[in-house]
Image (spheres, rainbow, N blue to C red):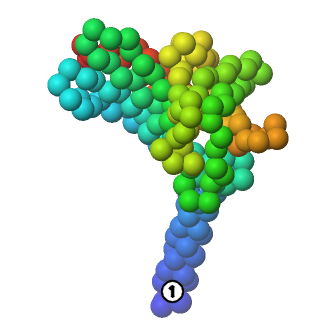
Amino acid sequence: MKLPRIRRIFWWLLSLSILTIFIFLGLCSPASQIAIAAVTKLEAVPGEIVYRSQTKLDDQSGQVWQTVLFKQIYPGQDISINLRLVGFPNSAELIHPQPLKITTASGQIFTAADVFLDEAPAPTIAQYDLKNILPQLPNAPLQLGIPLPGQKFINISVPQSIVQEWRQILTANSGN
């Protein structure tokens, strides 16, 4: 009578162990890169509204980049929409001023002007003007190409969920 109960407990523990391993492998799989971001609204100083989406994405060699798309609204001034890319330690040093290459899933290429004309705050930081480009981008995954010397690029894949957040920022206004 004890043997069937022990066998049942054994199979239950084995099943639980297998389920735990599958969950762990699913969460740690590099093929299933999960990008989590959220649109936030800030009022840095009275009258200045900033909407932003911030997330971490990997480049083609596994280096992590912080990507921040932000829209600044100042009373009586033009709205600015910029994409800041910040490389974490061991990232390549970026050259300025060089445009960002944005490639859509259909192969259409856009170029965004480098905001840092002379020198960036740090060698692994870049910022690009997306004000006129963002409205033209499809609601689909994108590839960002950060230029390096010698016609080389650091490529960062942007999932559709992040592009959707960027489009939310495009439509956000100070009345929200």
Q: Decide if residue 142 is in sight here.
A: no
Secondary structure, mark 1, is: helix
- Where residue 89 sits: x, y (%)? 56, 59
The residue nearer to you, when weighing 16 against 87, is 87
- Where the C terminus falls, by quadrant? top left
Q: Give the side of residue 4 with respect to residue 39, left or right.
A: right
Q: Give the side of residue 47 with respect to residue 119, left or right.
A: left
- Residue type, mark 1 in image: Ile
The image quarter containing residue 140 is top right
> What is the residue that sits farthest to the front in this orientation?
118
Q: In this view, does 70 lie above or below 9?
A: above
- Where residue 60 sits: x, y (%)? 72, 47
Q: Give the side of residue 76 with respect to residue 14, left or right.
A: left
Q: Give the side of residue 49 with respect to residue 38, left or right.
A: left
The residue nearer to you, when weighing 92 against 11, is 92
- Where residue 19 sits: x, y (%)? 56, 65
The residue carrying mark 1 is 6
The residue nearer to you, when weighing 151 against 57, is 151
> What is the residue that sits farthest to the top in this orientation?
76
- Where residue 125 sits: x, y (%)? 54, 43
Q: How many marks on residues? A: 1
Give the residue displayed 40% in from the left and 23% down from the top.
71
Q: Is residue 60 above or below residue 38?
A: below
The image quarter containing residue 40 is top left
Give the residue displayed 38% in from the left and 11% down from the top.
78
Q: In this view, does 110 lie above or below 28?
A: above
The residue nearer to you, when weighing 116 against 171, is 116
> What is the residue that sits farthest to the bottom in this orientation?
2
Give the residue displayed 56% in from the left and 64% down from the top.
24
Q: Is residue 162 above or below residue 49?
A: below
Local packing at callout 1 (Cα closer than 10 Å; few below 14, some 14-19, many 20+) is few
Q: Decide if residue 105 is in sight here.
A: yes
